[in-house]
Amino acid sequence: MPVMPVSPPHSPSRRRLLEASVLLSGLAGLAPLNALAAACAKQSGPWIPSDGFLAELPRIMQAFAVPGVGIAVVEDGEVAWSRGFGVTHALTRAPVDARTVFEDASLSKPVFAYLVMQLVDQGLIDLDRPLVRYRRMDYLADHPWIELITARDVLRHSTGLPNWRKAPATEKLVPMVKPGTRIDYSGEAIFWLQLVVETITGQSLDESMQTHLFGPAGMKDSSYTWNNDLAARSVYGHRRHDATDPGMPPQMFREQWSIAQQVAERTGKPLSSWKYDDAARALPEVMALAPAGLVTWPGDIVANAAASLRSTVQDYATFLTLMMARKQRGSWEVTEATRQAMLTPQIKIPGRWTEKGLGWNMEETRDGPVFYHSGSNGDIFKNFAVGDAQRRRGIVVLTNGGSGSFVHQRVVRAATGYDLLSYDL
């Protein structure tokens, strides 16, 4: 299979020694779980998957109908290794390479959280000030709990808001519980905070990201929106391996963006510069061009901090390096205290085995805590990123298949030796 260029060769003695035959639990003829646990316990050294495992990876991808995978590894606080496997589209067979852009799905959220924390460091936003004091959207319900929601609640998922409304064009956004009392994973909350950031900065999401993060970090292949170059380099999503529907599934963001781009080109304002009000003005024209039901409200055609980030796997690994412990940080980066706060539990809920930081989840391992996040869009993209900030290492796996979680679990397990509980989310 085509592969992306990798870093200079490393000694095999420094690679993972766990053999693929032990790791592929769930496929026929493979080792029992006690053998898997024993093998995982022996893990040490870099988080670069072994040659033996990588030789097996195409077989795993085929078993779960995942056409394309990108993997990148951080070691000693730097992007140390990356490789791509397979194709961007099962029919066209275009190879995954170093310039391939994946749909990161909910891996968008920690990246946005970093921007928010940069603004916190600059004194532009207060984590504990109610969001309504910055911006109250007309789709918010008239409810006393709305008045209590803060940016801290958003980043630790304690707003009480639902993930997504079923009918955002007509349905008000209402909290299900009082903020700060339980964990409710909410894309709606992230999107509202995005609009607050718009108000504070006067910029679109992509403009703010370019100014504060993508530009300084060198993440030149990352965007929350769309253009012709991204369209040409972006992977297509594919159905689960056990799906019965024929043909390619709907490509929601690609289809919505492609239509919105026609309006953007006519008006001369690129999608990367659109704010919510721009999308609201363009909505009638976009809806007239779109199939019924594809576009229903401005949120469908504006950058979405919770879900619409696209990046190469190397760019996402570059972002992971910003979460690693080190003595000196760039002037544009979050402060050391802020970095630590992002990886510190922000709310205690009895009975939970994971913790919520600010933008990240945490899970304890035999070696201490790791931070992680998963991503899933439309049941056709599945992604995972995990890092150990103190040991300055991380790994990100991006896929273009609905069964990609079966693949990224095996990749991460092979690389880290951890059988994380978070795999089962």
Image: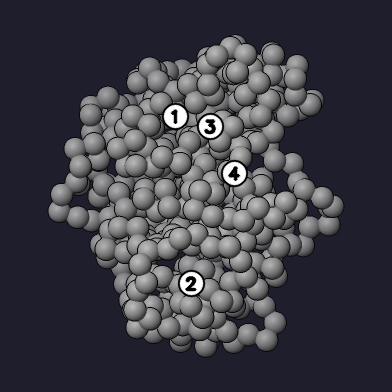
Q: From the image, tell me which residue sits under label 2.
A: 413
Q: Nearer the viewer, residue 166 or 61?
A: 61
Pointer 3: residues within 10 angstroms few (<14), some, or many (20+)? many
Q: Quadrant of residue 378?
A: top right
Question: Which of disc 3 and disc 4 is earlier in sequence?
Answer: 3
Q: Is residue 158 above or below residue 71?
A: above
Q: Is residue 104 visible?
A: no
Kind of residue indicated by mark 1: Asp
Residue at coordinates 73% horizontally, 29% vertically from top-left? 294
Instruction: Say which of 372 and 412 sits in front.
Output: 412
Q: Which residue is mark 4?
A: 234
Q: Residue at x 69, y 52 (%)?
A: 89
- Given residues 213 and 390, the one toward you in this image is 213
Q: Nearer the viewer, mark 1 or mark 2?
A: 1
CA gap, disc 4 and disc 3: 12 Å
Q: On residue 206, which mark appears?
A: 1
Mark 2 closeness class: few <14, some 14–19, many ≥20 residues within 10 Å: many
Q: Give the mark nearer the N terminus: 4 vs 1.
A: 1
State the scheme by which the image is colored: one colour
- Cα–Cα gap, marks 1 and 3: 7 Å
Labelled disc at residue 225: 3
